[in-house]
Image: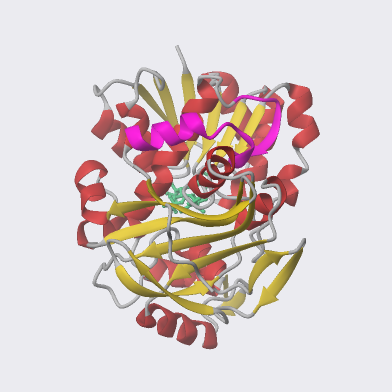
Amino acid sequence: MKKTLVIGAGGVASVAIQKMVQNYEIFEEIMIATRTKSKADTLKKMLDGKGSIIHTAQVDADNTEELIALINKFKPEVVVNLALPYQDLTIMDACLATKTHYVDTANYEPKDEAKFEYSWQWAYRDRFADAGITALLGTGFDPGVTGVFSAYALKHEFDEINYIDILDCNGGDHGYPFATNFNPEINIREVSADGSYWENGQWIHTKPMEIKREYNFEGVGEKDMYLLHHEELESLGINISGIKRIRFFMTFGESYLKHLEVLENVGMTSIEPIMYEGREIIPIQFLMALLPDPASLGPRTIGKTNIGCIFVGKKDGVEKTYRLYNICDHQESYAEVGSQAISYTTGVPAMIGAMLVLTGQWQKPGVYNVEEFDPDPFMEALNKWGLPWIEDFNPTLVD
Ligand code: NDP
């Protein structure tokens, strides 16, 4: 019987686990282990009897020894890390110690430094290879599907890809003046950081929100989008041969940006601890306690996401443009799994990545990003499991 250990029971985990249960022939037995066990128990209650056998446990994923004990007891084939990026390394250590495959959706970020990059996880390559186990990094939507789209475009549409623009548009409206669609601390750390893009083998750095473009997204309409640093730029810049430039743009509304600016100006987004009434607090964590829980946005959010990649490259010596994208409807996601589309578009690819590792289609000893595997079974699974993709052979380009 195939066993999967999922760490975390938040927005993304909730969708991934529901999709695993829909796919119970692969995910026969699932252990949901998280910090607040009652959240895992709620999921178990909802899903018991629907196909997979579900267990729950409490675990502190910052503690490698606790994780090792849990893995040794349950003996899963794969551990799917849907906790926070802070836990990536402790969970990878536990996987190494127990020779268990590892899957995640976000690259490691130290708690005390707002910086994310793959170097920490890529440093595990030899140890995972020697242990004969696979680590699949970043199998959400972006990173994740964007990397699979890139590998698919290179395999089927191009001889070489020279330019990639990743466009992440969330046209959803939750009716709050300010809220984030996934974990607020991680989200705000990401969008308030300096931007950057990869060009001719080096990083070009920008100020936060310095580069703005407009784009007309099918299903959403005309939106402002801003250049951000994003983790898949780092791996795709290396793994997609012939690449000259790769950029990432995300849409933000005026209200979101205005709130963020004010919060930053007053110091509420800081990760530096401050003393308040004799107690140390971290402003961004206090802010997170005030903001709506992303999981509560589901019933209120209307509209669609439109996320994908525009490719410019060459086929048979001729320049060619191509776009691959997905449109996901917030309310359809909510009707199916009780979550808005951001958790949906991350949770479905997390399930698919875990499935491909479990079935052996995406197993090779070492640490890999999604674009380093054959994209075809993943692309097929996206259509089957709720994130169908659309091709455009004459896309509007971003200048
Ligand atoms: P949530 O905050 O909703 O959920 C996080 C879960 O992890 C919670 O259940 C939390 O427990 C648990 N957790 C946190 N710390 C620990 C710990 N030390 N030990 C055990 N469990 C812990 O986050 P999301 O579901 O929104 O995001 C999950 C992951 O998905 C994040 O890494 C995020 O960066 C990533 N992501 C990736 C995307 C992509 O496209 N690639 C897009 C969106 C998100 P508790 O309930 O106690 O807080």
User: Residue 76: percent from the left, percent from the top?
Assistant: 53, 21
Name the outermost residue toward the top: 1
Residue 57 in sight from this viewpoint:
no
Give the residue displayed 41% in from the left and 82% down from the top: 259
Establish if 7 lies above or below 262: above
Examine the structure image and report whether residue 341 is included in the region drawn in magenta: no
Q: Quadrant of the N terminus?
A: top left
Identify the residue at the far front of this view.
Answer: 317
Foreground residue, 41 or 330?
330
Residue 318 coordinates in the image, percent (x, y):
60, 52
Tell me the residue at 50%/53% (across/down).
Answer: 142
Q: Is residue 20 visible?
A: yes
- Disc tally is 0
Residue 366 lies in quadrant: top right
Is the C terminus in the top left, top right, bottom left or bottom right quadrant?
A: bottom right
Q: Nearer the viewer, residue 305 or 291?
A: 305
Which is more toward the observer, 13 or 374?
Answer: 374
Residue 233's spot in the image, x, y percent? Answer: 63, 57
Residue at image point 41% right, 20% down: 26
Q: Which residues are magenta?
A: 363-384
Q: By what rule are the colours in the image chosen?
A: secondary structure
Please tell me which residue is depicted at 40% across the width and 43% down the height of the picture.
347
Q: Is residue 353 above or below residue 397?
A: above
Q: Nearer the viewer, residue 72 or 76?
A: 76
Q: Is residue 375 magenta?
A: yes
Position of residue 30 relative to residue 124, above or below, is: above
Q: Is residue 116 left or right of residue 305?
A: right
